[in-house]
Amino acid sequence: MVLASCSSLQLGAALAAHLFDSTGSTGATLLRLGLAALILLVAVRPRVRKWEARQWRAIAVLGVSMAGMNGFFYAAIDRIPLGTAVTIEFLGPLALAAVLTHRARDLAWVLLAGIGVVLLWAGSEGLDGEGLDPVGVVLVLVAAVFWAGYILASARVGAAVPGHGGLAVAVAIGALVLLPAGAHGASAAFTQPDLLLLAAGTGLLASVIPYSLELAALRRLPKSLFGVLLSLEPVVAVLAGWVLLSQGMRPLEAVAVAVVVAASVGSTLSARPAPAERSPEPARTPDPVLPG
C-alpha cells in the first residue's frame, strides 16, 4: 500500500506537470486540491456543526500547510526535475525530526541529507555550465518547510478531530487559500475537456488515492517500517520523471538521491523506541503523516 501510494503520488505530480503550460503551477495545484476536496467531502460528509473552535483552528492550520506545501512544490517542479525536487523536499521532515528529538544522531542524519543535496546540486552541472534553477531550489525548500508544518498540523488534527472529516475540510481550505492566485489559470481547464480530465486524474492520483492507501497502511504497519518505505519516495519520483517527463539523471545525482534516502531511512530507524520503552498495551491506530 505504501509503495502504491508513493507511485500514485508521483504519477499524479507528473500528470500535473503537463497542466502547467495551460493552467500554471498554481492553477494546477488549485485544481488538484479542489477536485480532491469535492471527492473527499462527498465521501466523508464531515459533521462540521459539532466542531469546536480549537478543532477549526487545527484544521485551518493544516489547510494552509497543505496549500503552501503543494503550491510551492508544484512551482518548483515547473523549474527543476521531479526527482530532484522530491529529494530536496525530504529535508523538511528530517530537520523536523532533529528539532523535536534534540539528539545528536538525528542532527547527523540531517547533515548527511544536506551532503546529498550538495551532491545533487554538483551533479546537475552539465558541460554547458547549466545546473539547477536557483529559484526552483528555493521554492522546494519553502515547500519542505511547509511539509514539516504539515506533519505537525496533521498530528494535531488527528488527535483533535475523529475520523477523516478534518482531512476533507483541510483539503478544501487549502484549495480556498490558493483560489485568488490560481483561479485564472485553473479556469482554462473548464473550457478544455482534456485538461479537466487530466486535472481530475491528478486529484485522484496525487491526493485521494495516496491518502486512502496510507491511512490503511498505517493501521497495519509500525510507524518505523512505514517511514522506511516512505523514504523510497525520491526513487519513485526519479523513475516517474524519467518515464513520464523524459527527465534523465547523471550518476552523481543518482548517488545524491541514494544518500538522502539513506539519511531518511537512518532517521526513521533511529527514532524507534528501545524495547524497554515500548508499551505492552496493544498499539492504537497511529495518526496519519502524509506527504503532499
Image: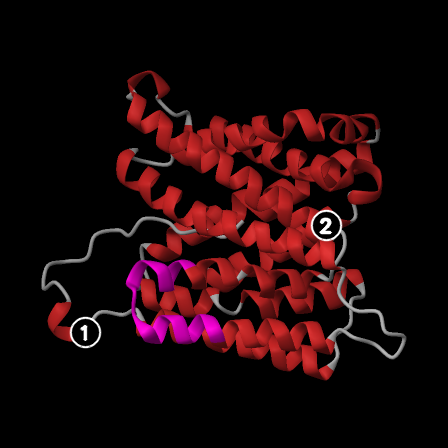
Q: Position of residue 261 (x, y in %)?
A: 52, 73
Boundaries of the magenta span: 96-111
Q: Position of residue 190 (x, y in %)?
A: 78, 26
Secondary element at tag 2: helix
Position of 11 relative to 204 (above/below): below
Q: Is residue 172 visible?
A: yes
Residue 54 included in the magenta stretch of the image: no
Q: Residue furthest right?
A: 128
Q: Is residue 12 visible?
A: no
Side of 184 where 65 appears, left or right: left
User: 80 or 191, which lies in front?
Assistant: 80
Side of 285 where 118 appears, left or right: right
Magenta highlight: main SS = helix
User: 147 or 291, which lies in front?
Assistant: 147
Residue 103 included in the magenta stretch of the image: yes
Residue holding disc 1: 274
**Residue at 75%, 73% in the rendered image:** 124
**Residue at 51%, 28% in the rendered image:** 173
